[in-house]
Image: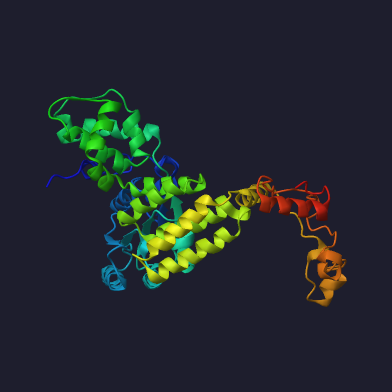
Amino acid sequence: MAVPLAERLRPDTLDGYIGQKHLVGENGVIRRFIQQGNIPSFILWGPPGVGKTTLARIVAKHLNRTMYTLSAVTAGVKDVREVIEKASKQRFFDSPQPILFIDEIHRFSKSQQDSLLGAVERGTITLIGATTENPSFEVISPLLSRCQVYVLKALDREDLLELINTALKKDFDLRQRTICVKESEAILSFASGDARKLLNILDIITSSKQGDIEITDALVTDVLQQNIALYDKLGEQHYDVISAFIKSVRGSDPNAAIYYLARMLEGGEDPCFIARRLVILASEDIGLANPNALLLANACFDTVKNIGMPEARITLAETTIFLATAQKSNTAYMAIENALSFVRAQTHPYNVPLHLRNAPTKLMAELGYSKGYKYAHDFKGDFVDLEFMPEGMEGTTFYHPNKENATEMKISERINLLWKDKYKA
């Protein structure tokens, strides 16, 4: 069986690695670790096809470390313990600890992740995990606290073009032919920043004809349409489909959303993966325009976990249609982004007003803690005009209601009624 182009071109040195300059460039943190001869346990988080597995292998090779590899899709607690036992037996005197690389670590259960803790903490192994999911949600806190997290980005246009040129110059099979890239827009568009996808497409294109070949946008589109099943399998199309699914729900198109939902389910996508996206979408894109959206999305997530497929398809469809047809608002999302940007830009934190601080001790009370605080429920309408912002921030506004939504229009009216012109809602 022929080795795929992506595997034939997998680099084994940092100098041959394309992309992720912020990590492996001249001042990249991973390059510095390698130069120093030691690395901490870390997790590589990024979309598929950006070099997570390759980078782990390069690190192990440069540091001359034994590397054990497990896939979270197929490995269990027993497999983890066997690797840790092998690593323990391998440690002699000051010899460096082996590397345990776990692909798709987000798919490990809590008990599987727990089984790694002791070995990581004792230094029996150096853990390198790879994930396409946000580690904050998918990796348990004790393990996450013992690992650095490095974010890998989709390859940009220059990286992808460099990868094409590298393939045409270095791959033995391709060098035997005259291959001219006359147009590159289509192949770059289909690749979507994914190096593996790009090389798989190039493999398909060059295999579609014998002898010399001129690559044009029309040729790329035509060949991929003829080989759509192969392209879907090799190109990890489900990440493109989940993007289309989310954008269809956000765009209030229930028919397109259901179509993409069906494609994901038929393709074997994890229904919990879809349900998690619906929960995020309910908060980010519908939010205060219809607070019931988050309740339904959470209920959907619980139901999908409890009943599984095939019945879960009905719950996913119900939630998808509800969210797609609901009024949209991203004001809650924008409010927290505005506040976070404000906090990050501060050169010094504003002090919490004394009247808002608790006074659990006599000294704190004598210092004025809690003095002047007024309990809102003691006043008419359960409201009292009291300053809650720190000094110097009076009237600062982070939340801007969407006045095109009836629900948020009522919120805006109440803010203005209570606070007059202070927050200009």
Residue at x 48%, y 58% (from the top left corner): 319
Image side of residue 11 versus residue 292, left or right: left
Q: Quadrant of residue 39?
A: bottom left
Image side of residue 290 versus residue 127, left or right: right
Residue at x 61%, y 59% (from the top left corner): 291
- Tell me if residue 35 can be seen: no
- Tell me if residue 417 can be seen: yes
Look at the picture and state if 401 lies above or below 219.
below
Viewer-closest of 284 and 355 = 284
Q: Quadrant of residue 122?
A: bottom left
Residue at x 51%, y 46% (from the top left corner): 252
Look at the picture and state if 257 lies above or below 92.
above
- Residue 130 position, x and y percent, is 37, 56
Image side of residue 271 versus residue 350, left or right: left
Viewer-closest of 325 and 32 = 325
- Residue 5 position, x and y percent, is 21, 41
- Residue 348 position, x and y percent, is 71, 51
- Residue 6 position, x and y percent, is 24, 43
Q: How is the image coloured?
A: rainbow
Labels in figure, total? 0
Viewer-closest of 146 and 131 = 131
